[in-house]
DNA sequence: GGCACGATGTCATCAATCTGTCATAGACGA
DNA sequence: TCGTCTATGACAGATTGATGACATCGTGCC
């Protein structure tokens, strides 16, 4: 399993280094930058699993970075943890309303920040935190690379496994073929959109059980979704 | 769509009342109790969408409640926000590690707590956090691409879906056929005005329910509107 | 090296559904 | 009543998704 990718945007070199060390110790793949604009570029290049963002940074301001991350479809759903100065109450709330998922007030203990980030990771990408995903009668253990349906072990190919995992991380949501290609195959893949259809079919075939409804919903002219049930 | 259900566990009557008031104002269906054991019973009876839990409460302690909520399969995935005393750093981290999703340190501003709860709701249940359009007995979830009427799932074609979505974004307003073409088909489309009539009919047929009035209003020589009801 | 095998990406084709237009019947207001 | 505007059923063409087949590629095994 790949480590969860964390983008750290912090312009105090000492603090940045400390946090990078801590997060790496927790098993995160950390990319750090002191600059807001560069952060946006990095986020576009490779979408991180979580962003830790200082409010007061060089270049584009923290809230602006937050807003832009939210505006771009690819990064719109990446959780953001803001680091704010103590007492700036309005800033905090504005941050949360802008789309940050959490904030931590300086000065903070690294342990606290790590605990908060872990809590969010558990919630957002349980598979990355070594937990079992459960949607309807499906359960997927990313660590063991195992998928069960009603207790039955299913045999899925690698691509179908990643596809199902992605669906289970966002149950109910509809994704276009392009989004699925980006998420499951990678943004740099150069693959026919129609190929997604074929893998959807393979996934369906892989998870079908007699007497159980097909949880993969086709949304004409929009894409596919995993039925939340 | 129903309001998100929030279970509030707080034994300070004044604070409990204040928070209950605030959360109700935000559109939550609040159930409040001062007692940890009762909280567990209530949570089993009707699984809430989110729990706000004071660390120091009568009966079973906060962390124990948290642990038990996590242990029970039905409530294992319900987000929990803890209220802790200032400075109890270890408690905070223990709380997060136990499975709480967030905590707020007393004394806190109700606005902050509400903002945090909203942020979590956005993340967890987008459908419950205002990303669902609701007009009368219709509800439309754009991310899941689903339309419900009185809880019934409706099957709409792509164009009817876009048409209804547009209407629901501007309930009550009358739009000419030209405006509808621009908004739903795109400004560069080159389509007969009369075609709108046909899709209005298809939309009506798609959302009709026995015993329910037609919410699409025809305004002679002007256009159509979705009845705000 | 040579072979078997599973995985993967593409195609061609079929079936289902959707769409825009018409012609006609019906409703409404003056 | 008349003229105007809307509702409706039918339809052919266009999209879109499902499916089976196939060539390729890499891996492990002999």
Image (cartoon, coloured by chain):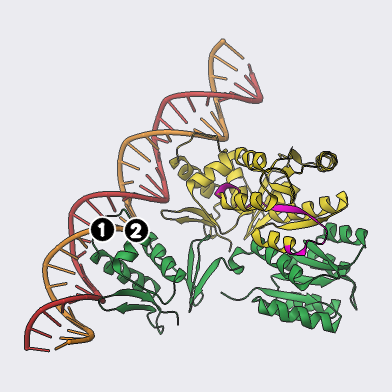
Chain colours: A yellow, B green, C orange, D red
Which image quarter holds the C terminus of chain A? bottom right
Q: Is residue B152 shown in magenta?
A: no
Question: To which chain does the residue with label 2 belong?
Answer: B
x, y percentage for residue D13?
21, 50
Q: Is residue A81 shown in magenta?
A: yes
Q: Which residue is mark 2?
A: B185
Instruction: Tell me which label, 2 or 1, sits earlier in the chain.
Output: 2
Depicted B160 relative to depicted A115: above or below: below
Instruction: Kindly check if marks 2 and 1 are in contact, taking CB atoms under 8 A apart as contact.
Output: yes
x, y percentage for residue B128?
61, 69
* Stretch of the chain drawn in magenta: A73-90
Depicted A14 relative to depicted A148: above or below: above
x, y percentage for residue A17?
83, 38
Task: Kindly state the secondary structure of the residue where label 1 is placed.
Answer: loop
Depicted A34 relative to depicted A123: above or below: above
Q: Could you tell whether B72 is left or right of A206 in the image?
A: right
The Cα atoms of the two marked residues, 2 and 1, are separated by 9 Å
Q: Could you tell whether C7 is left or right of C19 in the image?
A: right
Q: Which residue is mark 1?
A: B191
**Quarter where residue B57 is shown:** bottom right
x, y percentage for residue A42?
65, 38
């Amino acid at each position: 399993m790949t480590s969860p990718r964390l983008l750290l945007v912090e312009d105090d070199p000492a603090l940045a280094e400390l946090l990078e060390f801590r997060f790496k110790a927790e098993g995160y793949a950390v990319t750090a930058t002191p600059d807001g604009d560069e952060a946006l570029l990095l986020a576009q290049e490779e979408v991180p699993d979580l962003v830790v963002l200082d409010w007061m940074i060089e270049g584009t301001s923290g809230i602006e970075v937050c807003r832009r991350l939210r505006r771009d479809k690819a990064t719109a759903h990446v959780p953001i943890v803001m680091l704010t100065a103590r007492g700036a109450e309005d800033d905090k709330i504005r941050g949360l309303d802008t789309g940050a998922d959490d904030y931590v007030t300086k000065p903070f203990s690294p342990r606290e920040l790590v605990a908060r980030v872990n809590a969010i990771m558990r919630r957002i990408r349980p598979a990355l935190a070594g937990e079992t995903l459960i949607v309807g009668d499906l359960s997927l253990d990313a660590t063991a690379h195992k998928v069960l349906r009603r207790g039955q072990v299913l045999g899925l190919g690698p691509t179908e496994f990643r596809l199902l995992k992605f669906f289970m991380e966002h149950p109910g949501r509809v994704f276009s073929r392009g989004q699925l290609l980006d998420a499951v195959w990678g943004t740099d893949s150069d693959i026919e959109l129609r190929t997604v259809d074929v893998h959807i079919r393979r996934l369906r075939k892989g998870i079908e059980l007699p007497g159980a409804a097909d949880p993969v919903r086709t949304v004409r002219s929009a894409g596919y979704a995993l039925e939340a049930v």
